[in-house]
Amino acid sequence: MNKVNKMTLNYHKDQSFEDENSSNSKLIHQVKGFLFGIVPVSSPDDMFLQFVNRKKDLLPRPPGPRFGQFNTFVKERLSFNIQRKIPILDAYVRDLMKFSESLKFNVRQLSNVMDEIEEIVRLDPRVAEVVLEPVVLERIVKILREIDDKHIKVTAAYILSASRLDKCNAVIINKAIQYLVDLMHDDYTVLRAMYTLISLARAYPGHASVIVEKNALNVALDVFTNYGEGYETLNCVGNFMVMVCQVKLSPDEERVALTILDKIIQVEHRYHYHIVRACDALQYLSFKKHVELEEHAFKRQIALIFHNNDEVASSALGVVGNIARWGRDDQLQILAKDSKFLQYLGKTMTCQPKEFLYKEVCQIISEIAAAQDGAFIQALEEAGLIDNLCSLLEVAKFDVKMEAAWDGLEKWRKPTAESIKINTDVAMFAETGCYSLAFVARDFNGELVWARACCGAGLTQPEVAEAIGLKEALSWSKQQLGQQHIISLRQIP
């Protein structure tokens, strides 16, 4: 008797799999026979064929099941008390993997083996966690490399998507990701490969960087160009871009990502999930950094704010908010001069029930106001935003009130490029005869360069205190050679 049959007979000795007192004892025996009903035969090929036929005869099968796979009947029974059955399934999968070593040139039988493993993995996440050991995953990765059969590749890709590749060493991870990226070139395997890569990145975020290193962004652009008309492809590429944009991209990779996202946004469909995912990806891409978003693409984002779907509008508003905070000055000018956009902000503050939108709108107004002159405050009044901000001060929660109270008050103007602006504030305390000075130096991007605060006594004239503040600012400025400095003085009443 060969080794596989000896191991199979050992399964029947495991009495923990069944409960003798249970009324379902006969059914459990049937399921057990389904899993381990191999009879002694002369060759591995005949053994596998009889194994499949044995399963077929032992179980009452519902109409229309696929041959050689678990059916609904078995899934329902095995899902009951699955924890007790995991050790049996684990051993069974290991045997299937060993058996698959002899099936390299028998695609049909190997396909049945892979289908069996896929169905076992689908039973329960706990099963997948146990049965997909590194040795099993390594064999599946090897199958991806060696077997040129589309169905087997799709099945193997699904099994990998249910696995925890982070349990494996870096070599296996890199190989698996490379093979999955290669599968994105084939119209039969592209979606399963992309979904698998997304699943791997969600399970372990470090995989996303490896995926980007394998040129997956350029492949994703080709996928969208060739198959982007299908809505499932749109959603898949959108989810893929959300995963990719969460990692640090090079300037070239960033340009490719922006191209893909802009193309997704331009696709019209009665469902809007793909636009939401594209905007989500743009939010990740533009968070705390400047992105080279073209003017036409930026204006498209502004237009999406007026979309009739609330989820699309709110995601687009998040992108515009990031650009208002960390974008270019010319992009802020576009927002400041768009009266329709300002009116939308006012409408959002009165109609939207979501607190986070209030805060987002207030922060956008504050960022725009910081880069404009007094004429912008007049534009706010014409758009009705001042009254809406006052209303928020009365009804909103504390954090929203703080944002609303600050809007329009911070009139800090950015200095010219490659220069530093020093704001000097003077405060007088007549009752005690004291004064205080505060200095804040910021660059063109609003980043803090230098700050200082000090106080003194014996002064009653504000002009003298201002002169002292100017002297201190000039003294610091002289130490910073090779840079232009702008000094702004203000007395706090």
Image: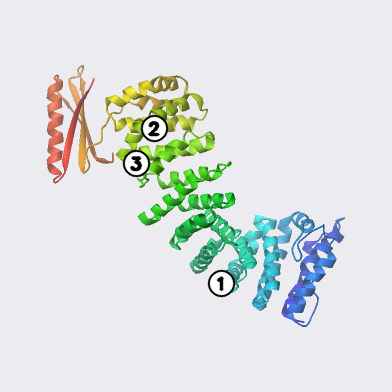
* Amino acid found under the numbered disc labelled 3: Gly
Rendered residue at 42%/47% (across/down)? 285
Comparing labels 1 and 2, the label whose residue is closer to the camera? 1
Q: Is mark 1 on a helix, strand or loop?
A: helix
Q: How far apart are marks 1 and 2 (CA)?
A: 52 Å
Residue 193 in view here: yes
Q: Do the residues labelled 1 and 2 touch (CB within 8 Å)?
A: no
* Amino acid found under the numbered disc labelled 1: Arg
Residue 248 in view here: no
Q: Residue 240 carries which label?
A: none
Q: What element carries label 2?
A: helix
Q: Residues within 10 Å of mark 3 (few under 14, many from 20)?
A: many
Residue 158, image x, y percentages? 62, 60
Task: Give the mark, 1 or 2, whose residue is nearer the N terminus.
Answer: 1
Badge 1 is on which residue?
A: 145
Residue 76, image x, y percentages? 77, 54
Residue 4 location, quadrant: bottom right
* Amino acid found under the numbered disc labelled 2: Gln
Q: How crowded is mark 1: few (under 14 residues within 10 Å), some or many (20 or more)?
A: some
Q: Which mark is residue 363?
A: 2
Badge 3 is on which residue?
A: 327
Number of disc labels: 3
Rendered residue at 87%/55% (across/down)? 23
Q: How far apart are marks 3 and 2 (CA)?
A: 14 Å
- Compared across the picture, whether 149 is left or right of 21 comes to left
